[in-house]
Image (cartoon, rainbow, N blue to C red):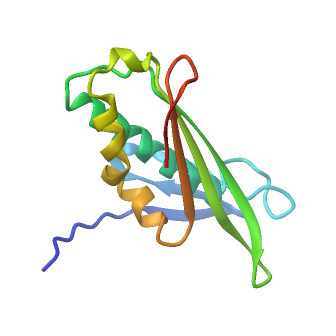
Amino acid sequence: MSESNSFSVQMRLLEGFKFEIDFGSAGQVLTDEPPPLGDGEGPNPSRLLAAAVANCLAASLLFAIRKFKEDPGQVSAQVRGDLERQEGRWRISKLSVELNLGTEAMTIPHLERALSQFENFCVVTQSVRQGIEVSVSVRDSNGDLLHQG
């Protein structure tokens, strides 16, 4: 039997296509569709999904490195989403995530081990990958490519 946990997020329409998403004690976020549907006053759901994938991967990489009590420096991420028509409807076909460490690879002794496992820690990415291609790369502060998956 599998273990199950649940979570809840509330949202309400404010006007047009603008919603307030309430994360409870974590606060609220406004979302909106870009013109011509909405006014672009907040990120749309596609961008929220991309941000969730990148954020989860960055946190998973931090966890994988920090469990060896090592410091990855200032980690940053950039994510690009590709949209394509599938059966006449726009769909996210691919997310490409680039994670950047704030330090050189040589300063992280267990980096290779962390890189081999961090993607598996990411709940969001592994769930999204069941329907959307997600590619991941990691670079150090010199821009050297350390991981591509």
Q: At 52% across and 46% down in the image, what residue appears? A: 136
Residue closest to the far bottom? 87
Asked if residue 16 can be seen in this view, the reply is no
Left or right of residue 88, residue 65 in this image: left
Report the number of discs. Answer: 0
Left or right of residue 22, residue 118 in this image: left
Looking at the picture, tell me which residue is in the foreground, 12 or 45: 45
Residue 117, percent from left and from top: 31, 46
Asked if residue 77 can be seen in this view, the reply is yes
Q: At 61% across and 49% down in the image, what residue appears? A: 96
Residue 61, percent from left and from top: 36, 37
As displayed, is residue 1 above or below residue 76? below
As displayed, is residue 60 above or below residue 24? above
Looking at the picture, tell me which residue is in the foreground, 99 or 146: 146
Left or right of residue 67, residue 114 in this image: right
Q: At 49% across and 51% down in the image, what residue appears? A: 53
Q: At 20% across and 32% down in the image, what residue appears? A: 67
Looking at the picture, tell me which residue is in the foreground, 43 or 30: 43
Residue 56, percent from left and from top: 41, 47
Residue 100, percent from left and from top: 51, 29
As displayed, is residue 121 above or below residue 6? above
